[in-house]
Amino acid sequence: MATAAVGLTTTQALLAWLLGRHSPERDTVFGRSVVVGLLLTFVLATASSFLLGGQQPPPGLGLPVVGWHLGQADARPAHFMGVHAHQWIPLAGWPLQRFCISHATVWLAAFAIAYVILWALLTRWALA
């Protein structure tokens, strides 16, 4: 299972490389957000997958639907953040480009940095 999961996230890095080299949108804010999101998915999801694979979720009932435990260390929220970076980062990049926000590239970088910081905090919490 772990090999398949790493193989799946590796495709995100390959997609980022292909889009970064060959996409006509690569020089737009949205194009950059897609590439950054894909790269972050590869890095963050792979790292949190190893953490999740070595740690069992806490016993008992958690949050409805997802089952996460907020009162105990749980690696699943960090893994969720890592797996879905390729959706959240472009979701932030699209309005920055669409509405011609001044300094959109800087705002995109700030959003991506905040995203990684949130992932790191969730990961640290999971290790506690």
Image (cartoon, rainbow, N blue to C red):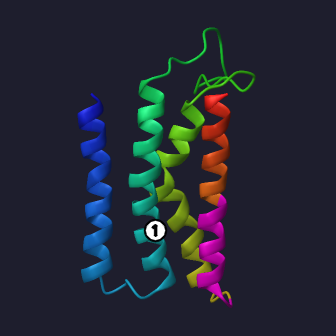
- Residue toward you, 91 or 4: 4
- Residue toward you, 79 or 127: 127
Q: Quadrant of the N terminus?
A: top left
Q: What residue is drawn where x is 28% and y is 64%?
A: 15
Question: Residue 85: x and y, percent?
Answer: 50, 55
Q: Is residue 77 above or below residue 37?
A: above
Q: Quadrant of the C terminus?
A: top right
- Residue toward you, 121 or 79: 121
The amino acid type of the residue labelled 1 equals: Val
Q: What residue is drawn where x is 28% and y is 52%?
A: 10
- Badge count: 1
Question: Residue 34: x and y, percent?
Answer: 43, 69
Q: Residues within 10 Å of mark 1 (few under 14, many from 20)?
A: many
Q: Is residue 76 above or below residue 82?
A: above
Q: Tell me the residue that label 1 is attached to.
A: 36
Mark 1: which secondary structure?
helix
- The span shown in magenta is 102-114
